[in-house]
Amino acid sequence: MEQSLNGKVALVTGAGRGLGRAMAGALAAAGARVAVAARTCAELDGFVAEQAESGREALAVPTDITDADAVDHMVDSTVARFGKLDILVNNSGIVVTTPLLELEPDEWDLIMATNLRGTYLATRAAGRHMVPQRSGKVINIASNHALIGVAEFAAYSASKAGVISLTKTMAVEWARYGISVNALAPGYFATPLNAELRADEELMAHVLRVIPTRRFGEPHELAPWLLLLAGEASDFMTGETIVIDGGQVAR
């Protein structure tokens, strides 16, 4: 199904690289004007330049997703530039792989602040604009690790499980305003962030054993699901989580 987002305005957090950047590109290619957020301009300016070369308008908003004032500024800057906000993609996230007994409270707190608090802050800020306009699409990026037990991922998995629960709560609260809130739960996707892992043949063999398709996903394979949730085809869909992981959760 072809999804056109002409006339729509999207904001993607964690868009400096990897899946975030790929998702921002997919939204722009579908016709949306896109604001991208990450910690530094260096991660964002390349995306804005690429869009300008294609005749598309984009905005870079450096943001600390754990800072409430910074997040409010991120959303308000997007609305000031484009006049509205139709689509929010909460993609900011970090992961630390540590055995539970070695996981320090500061590490736990940082992961929760980024992955869960950041999602709450961005959605709250976006809701202040979406509720009055009585429309909007919120797409939270969770993880298949929220649905299975994976050793050494305690904080990350717990934070993403929280994102799924938050998705359901927001969906129920905001359905009356015409706002859909859904989540994507990716498994392993090939990005620059896991290039070192993919280069380690022994480690890759171990990881691939738990993926029935025996491969990592490619960023472009996430785009159709993102565009589904961003477009009108999903207007009657809210509170759901779509798993895209090569069958890992199904094992």
Image: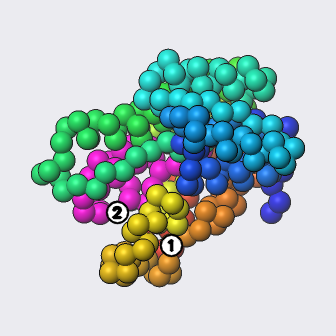
Magenta residues, start to end: 138-164
Q: Determine whether 52 is above or below 214 in the image.
A: above
Q: Determine whether 79 is above or below 12 in the image.
A: above
Q: Is residue 193 magenta?
A: no
| Whether residue 240 can be seen here | no
Q: Residue at x 47, y 50 (%)?
A: 142
**Percent x, y of residue 129:** 67, 22
Q: Residues within 10 Å of mark 2 (few under 14, many from 20)?
A: some
Q: Is residue 152 magenta?
A: yes
Callout 1, which amino acid?
Answer: Phe
Q: Residues within 10 Å of mark 1 (few under 14, many from 20)?
A: some
Q: Residue at x 67, y 44 (%)?
A: 46
Callout 2, which amino acid?
Answer: Ile
The answer to whether marks 1 and 2 mark residues whose Cβ atoms lie closer than 8 Å is no
Instruction: Provide the residue designation for mark 1.
Output: 216
The foreground one among 46 and 123 is 46
Mark 1 and mark 2: span between their CA atoms? 17 Å
Instruction: Provide the residue designation for mark 2.
Output: 148
Left or right for 16, reference 210: right
Residue 176, by quadrant, is: top right
Q: Which mark is residue 194?
A: none
Q: Residue at x 53, y 34 (%)?
A: 40
Q: Quadrant of the C terminus?
A: bottom left
What is the total number of numbered labels drawn onto the structure image? Answer: 2
The foreground one among 200 and 153 is 200
